Image (cartoon, grey):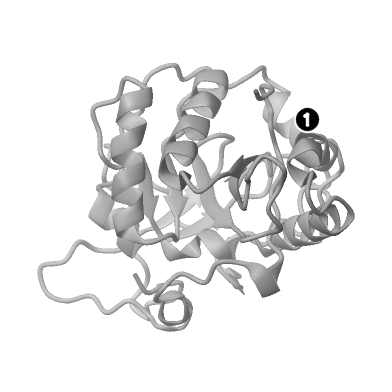
């Protein structure tokens, strides 16, 4: 049914899903109240640690009744996976995500902007597919949509062209389109996602990885993407749509301890 790297992702903006609360999430700062966990700046500095999951569409219905596309992006390597979804969206997402994990290993977590109730259903279904004792492998976070805008733009163009050219059979060409993208030099890193992802062999985390932060801390924190070693592109770390000019604070050990955002609240996001 699928191949080990059934990649591709796209986002035709005029027809993409707009989840409830997106406008507020993308424009409002976090308001930290007394007793709440402090937010962190979490640096994405290794492949297959933090992934972004989204559901894109609706698109023209394929001959196999597909209407949407699940996309999964590794923010560090720019590796992309994608799967066509039917109306059984929750079950489809869980099955495909479990398949990717079996093939490539466990990430630290998967970030997603889709509604929290839907994420609860996906996490519950995912537990049926793989042997994990957690309800938070997929975590709600609004930066999913705009943390890596360069990759998003590439995906938008790719899927729009694919759906336009193959209106009722785009699901057939989805794997090849993703493979081509993963084997093309990325503007940000100056390297092919395939090279960054596979240079040291495939990821080898065959069991669930403990998070270095609590789920509530992740909700309140901002993510930045570290430059890939040897990258030829822009080396500024990104926090959503704003570039960090000052050095990024890295997470520290023991697990759960990390640097807080500065007093100005720079880089904070709404959740």
Label 1, residues with CA under 10 Å away: few <14, some 14-19, many ≥20:
some
Task: Depth check: give the residue in front, 134 or 67.
Answer: 67
Res. 202 image quadrant: top right
Q: Which residue is mark 1?
A: 195
* Residue 182 versus residue 216 in the image, above or below: above
| Residue sitting at x 80%, y 55% | 163
Q: Is residue 235 visible?
A: no
Is 238 on the left or on the right of 270, as rendered? Answer: right
Q: Secondary structure at mark 1?
A: helix
Task: Depth check: give the residue in front, 108 or 25.
Answer: 25
Residue 29 coordinates in the image, percent (x, y): 38, 80
Residue 196 coordinates in the image, percent (x, y): 72, 33
Q: Is residue 35 visible?
A: yes
Tell me the quadrant of the picture where the C terminus can be found: bottom left
Res. 58 image quadrant: bottom right
| Residue sitting at x 36%, y 43% | 122
């Amino acid at each position: 049914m699928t191949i080990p790297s059934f990649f591709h992702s796209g986002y035709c903006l005029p027809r993409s899903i707009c989840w409830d609360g997106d406008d507020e999430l993308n424009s409002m700062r976090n308001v930290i109240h007394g007793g709440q966990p402090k937010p962190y700046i979490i640096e994405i500095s290794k492949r297959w640690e933090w992934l972004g999951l989204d559901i894109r569409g609706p698109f023209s219905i394929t001959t196999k009744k597909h209407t949407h596309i699940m996309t999964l992006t590794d923010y560090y390597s720019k590796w992309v996976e994608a799967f066509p979804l039917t109306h059984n969206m929750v079950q489809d997402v869980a099955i495909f995500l479990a398949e990717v994990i079996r093939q490539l290993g466990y990430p630290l977590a998967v970030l997603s902007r889709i509604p929290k109730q839907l994420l609860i259903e996906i996490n519950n279904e995912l537990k049926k597919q793989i042997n994990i004792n957690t309800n938070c492998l997929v975590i709600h976070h609004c930066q999913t949509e705009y943390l890596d805008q360069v990759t998003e733009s590439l995906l938008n163009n790719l899927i729009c062209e694919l759906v336009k050219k193959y209106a009722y059979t785009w699901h057939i060409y989805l794997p090849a389109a993703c493979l081509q993208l993963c084997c093309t030099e990325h503007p940000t890193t100056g390297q092919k996602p395939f090279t960054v992802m596979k240079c040291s062999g495939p990821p080898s985390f065959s069991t669930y990885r403990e998070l270095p932060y609590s789920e509530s801390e992740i909700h309140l924190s901002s993510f930045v993407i570290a430059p890939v070693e040897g990258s030829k592109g822009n080396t500024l770390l990104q926090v959503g749509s704003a570039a960090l000019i000052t050095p990024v604070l890295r997470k520290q050990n023991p697990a759960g301890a990390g640097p807080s955002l500065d007093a100005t609240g720079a880089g904070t996001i709404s959740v």
